[in-house]
Amino acid sequence: MWHLHDFMSPSEISIVKSLIGIAWADGVYAAGERAVIGALLDTFGATAEETAEIERYASEPQTLDRSVLAELESGDRAMLLEHAVLLSMIDGEFHKTEEEQVESLRLKLEIPEADATPILESAKMRASQMRALL
């Protein structure tokens, strides 16, 4: 697969690490969640070393890291929020803890509720479409 670059940018690493924190919100890093993270690593053009580093990071429960989120620009923040919903719903359930994590993420990202609503609705629709393909 051809990529624009041969390594991940700091914001891409921040997005992936934040999503791993979301994935662990229900106490389980499930196969579907690992598949989404793997696909995102492919999309971001992660090297084998970066992939191994992310896999090591994800091997133990993680939480959202405010310092990681602070590095993200506006477009990256919206993309992270959308992917957090996709990741949370990939197993077919939107657990209360995952919903709370997504809301906490929205607040930490400082995305106003009015701006977040269409992002969240679109992500929920995409998640159900993705589940149908799995």
Image (tube, helix red, strand yellow):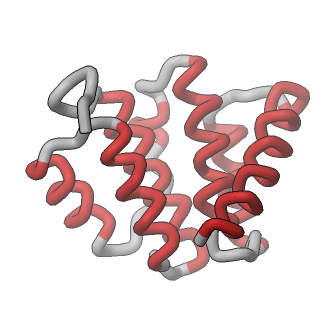
- Residue 60: image quadrant is bottom left
What residue lies at 47% left-to-right and 28% top-to-bottom?
A: 70
Q: Residue at x 53, y 80 (%)?
A: 27
Instruction: Locate residue 11, reporting x and y percent.
Output: 37, 29
Q: Position of residue 71 (x, y in %)?
A: 41, 25
- Residue 132 at x, y = what percent? 70, 68
**Can you say which quadrant of the picture contains the C terminus?**
bottom right
The residue located at (36%, 58%) in the rendering is 38
Quarter of the figure with residue 26: bottom right
Q: Quadrant of residue 120?
A: top right
Judged from this view, the residue extending furthest toward the left is: 49
Q: Is residue 93 above or below residue 18?
A: below
Figure label count:
0
Residue at (49% x, 53% y) in the render = 19
Image position of 112 (left or right of 54): right
- Residue 45 lies left or right of residue 132; in this view the side is left
Choose between 99 and 12: the one closer to the eye. Answer: 12
Up/down of 22 relative to 67, above or below: below
Q: Can you give x and y, in whole percent of width and height, for residue 69 in the image?
A: 48, 35
| Vertical placement of residue 113 versus 46, above or below | above
Q: Is residue 26 left or right of residue 48?
A: right
Quarter of the image for the N terminus: give it: top left
- Tell me: 115 left or right of 87: right
